[in-house]
Amino acid sequence: PPSQEWWKEAIVYQIYPASFLDSNHDGLGDIPGIISKLDYIQSLGVNAIWLSPIFKSPQNDMGYDISDYRTIHEPYGSVKDTEALIQGCHDRKIKVLLDLVVNHTSHEHEWFQESRSSKASPKRGWYIWRDAKFDSEGTRQPPNNWASIFGGSAWTWDEGSGQYYLSLFLPEQPDLNWENKDMREATYADMEFWLDRGADGFRIDSMNLMSKHPELPDAPVIDPDSEFQPAALYYASGPKMHEYIREMRLKVFEKYDCMTVGELGFTKDENSVAQYVARDRHELNMVFTGDIVDLDFGKDHKYGPGNFQLSKLRDITNLWQHAMPRCDGWNAVYMDNHDSGRSLSRYASDLPQYRKAAAKMLATYLATLSGTLFLLQGQEIGMANIPETWGVEEYIDVEARNYYETVLKQRGDRTKMGDVLREMRKKARDNGRLPMQWDSSKHGGFTSQERPWMRVNDDYVEWNVKGQENNQESVLSYWKQILQLRKDEKDVFIYGRYDMIDMDLSGEDVFAYTMTSWDRNKSALVLLNFSAQNKRFYGNGRFDGWTQLLAGQGGSKLTASGVELDPYEGVIYCNW
Ligand code: ISL
């Protein structure tokens, strides 16, 4: 039998604190708001939450820029509130994961303030400082040609101390120098501060960016029109990465019964990923590989033109469902987070006639795969992306804004930005950050403030928690059922073996696979129609006598000749 662990059986609900529930009428969600909804969270059947950053921060990147790890962002609440939240979760057997952002800090962090105070500062080496270069005309240039992930140079000039510092995200997010032992020790102490207060683990932000190539070499020129070049080659999964993780594990994780999930951008190949999660390496429990959210990214850029293709989803699912057993690692199963659009709108359909079926079909996909399951707040009620009628001014996140402004500068004409806006409607991070839709009252019950920090999707009147709670047919009821099924049949789904079914039987638009219990006694057949047409699945006699286990909408009988699937139908059959 596979080794059974609580973190393997965790069903994690991601909370985006700013957008969950506003309890003090300032238009922004807060920790007491989360506490007031713990019974709701428990009712879903999840057994863990992941809180996006709640720490003190000037909010240049919505809290992914932390200025003090031991203080809470004031509008969200206090350390006391957070302890009460952790206690409330534990009372309900819900684990709590915090977001650990230690690739960088905010520029307002005391460490950085000291580091930038002078070249002689004892904390100078806590960040990555380099001298300027000068071109033939004697103009000051950054130390290398790396592009920031959010646009522009990855280097920021510091006038006061006369050097550049590395900032792979915003200039307000200076990268920490993990080579520095004192910095590492201080970070471990901050981690223990929260583990000692009951946190059950961390989602580790930008995990694989912590070790950079020591020489910080120029990146190859991929985009000749741009001054700065993508340089993940030199800053992702660098030479000391695994040394750092092992130290973190020895010094911190091993002292606690905690769960770790690392976020890996850029690192996608099986061997490199295995190095983070293979059991015998004792590093992380699991990682988020970015490929599942990148499916419709443009060729060269997230906001370049791109469309969802089921074949890619199939490939990625096949890859990781088999790769993790091969290295004795563990999958993090997810499709949505706060960094992109909702999978419902991007990979299936939020058109009124398909939305309910499509949301349930995606739930069926997620809840039947082997691994630890993560869902984003609002996914349980089928929340959708920003409506087409909203203008560009509703997009307030820095990533899409920077991109839009850069392209606008090149084109010089606001009326010629339709293609960019179209891609933003699919993939902008704002989509995953819209406030929760609790009921049909003003602003979806998210806030009683006149102006929420972010506009609530107009569809809240029809799509909200309250309306779905007492409706057996709702997306919410379906999520509750399928999460219960996942737990009841954990040998099949959580710990089971995945096998894709040949496309001769399913056709291109239907994703079909079986999950088989590790003792081989039970098998489930999962059929997912990713198209707006009726599709036939040919059983070819392989599934004779299998009965329906769960269906999103009504379902259809599986006979020897197969079954006819409705648009976006998802259904599970079983042999027991
Ligand atoms: O969102 C992305 C692409 O659109 C990713 O490149 C993302 O920036 C990357 O995965 C790192 O994300 C994490 O760190 C960022 C923060 O802005 C994101 O919200 C966070 O998830 C910097 O801390």
Image (spheres, grey):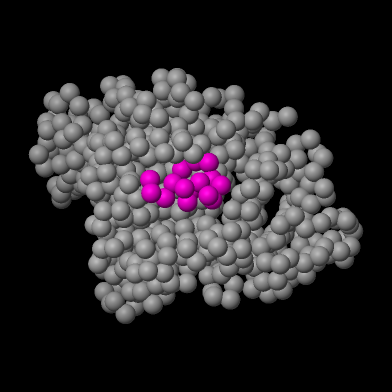
Residue 182 part of the magenta segment: no
Question: To which quarter of the image does residue 81 belong?
Answer: top left
- Asked if residue 289 shows in the view, the reply is no
Q: Which residues are magenta?
A: 35-49
Q: Is residue 563 above or below residue 106?
A: below
- Residue found at x 26% / y 53%: 24
Observer-nearest of 19 and 431: 19
Observer-nearest of 16 and 407: 16
Residue 239: x %, y % from top left? 44, 29
Residue 40 part of the magenta segment: yes
- Residue found at x 71% / y 39%: 491
Q: Is residue 366 above or below residue 80?
A: below
- Residue found at x 67% / y 66%: 553
Observer-nearest of 233 and 277: 277
Q: Is residue 23 above or below residue 269?
A: below
Residue 432: x %, y % from top left? 42, 58
Does residue 251 appear to the left or right of 566 in the view shown? left
Question: To which quarter of the image does residue 533 belong?
Answer: bottom right
Does residue 120 appear to the left or right of 384 in the view shown? left
Q: Residue furthest left?
A: 160
Q: Quadrant of the N terminus?
A: top right
Q: Residue furthest bottom?
A: 415
Residue 200: x %, y % from top left? 45, 32
Does residue 176 appear to the left or right of 237 in the view shown? left
- Residue found at x 36% / y 29%: 197
Residue 339: x %, y % from top left? 41, 53
